[in-house]
Image (cartoon, helix red, strand yellow):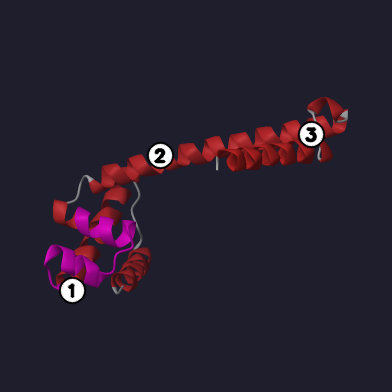
Amino acid sequence: MEGWLTRIATNTCLNLIRGAKRRPELTLSNLSEDESSWLDAQLSEVAAERHRSAERNLVAADLADRVLGTLAPEDRLTLTLIDGEDASVKEVAEMTGWSESKVKVRAFRARRRVREAMEKLLGHKREKGDLRLATAVNESAGDR
């Protein structure tokens, strides 16, 4: 058995070495000046976008924590389960022991409080029409 496993390992290594010879690596020194500068520009653009994306995610997470911190624990739980973890109203009702109606009402009211807290944090006031539109969006999201 040992000889058989040794032979399989040896053949696998030899196949890897042969494959590497057929596909030689391209080094940066083999690139022309134009290709090298294009590659540098692409890599720096990708790195910058990743940095901006990570920064936006941190800001959004901080804002979400601040806003959720203003809610009652039951409201925070409801929103976290429904909107954060995509649990259905029925699943949340089973987990909490509440009726489905209570879960829907809690989610609706919690979303309204989150919207109000966001507006307060950002220093914005909504027009009446915008408030009706946002309420309609929240009502349709609460029907999940």
Q: Are marks 3 and 1 in contact (CB under 8 Å)?
A: no
Q: Residue at x 30, y 71 (%)?
A: 139
Task: Point out the tag, 3 or 1, that comes first from the N-terminus.
Answer: 3
Q: Residue at x 35, y 45 (%)?
A: 122
Which amino acid type corresponds to the residue marked 2 in the rendered image?
A: Val
Q: Disc 3 and disc 1: Cα gap in Å?
A: 61 Å
Q: Disc 3 and disc 2: Cα gap in Å?
A: 41 Å
Q: Quadrant of residue 57?
A: top left
- Front residue of 119/144: it is 144
Q: Nearer the viewer, mark 3 or mark 1?
A: 3
Above or below, 87 relative to 34: below
Magenta span of residues: 76-101
- Front residue of 135/125: it is 135
Query: Which residue is identified by label 2?
Result: 59
Mark 2 lies on a secondary structure that is helix
Residue 49 location (% of width, % of height): 59, 39
Q: Residues within 10 Å of mark 3 (few under 14, many from 20)?
A: few
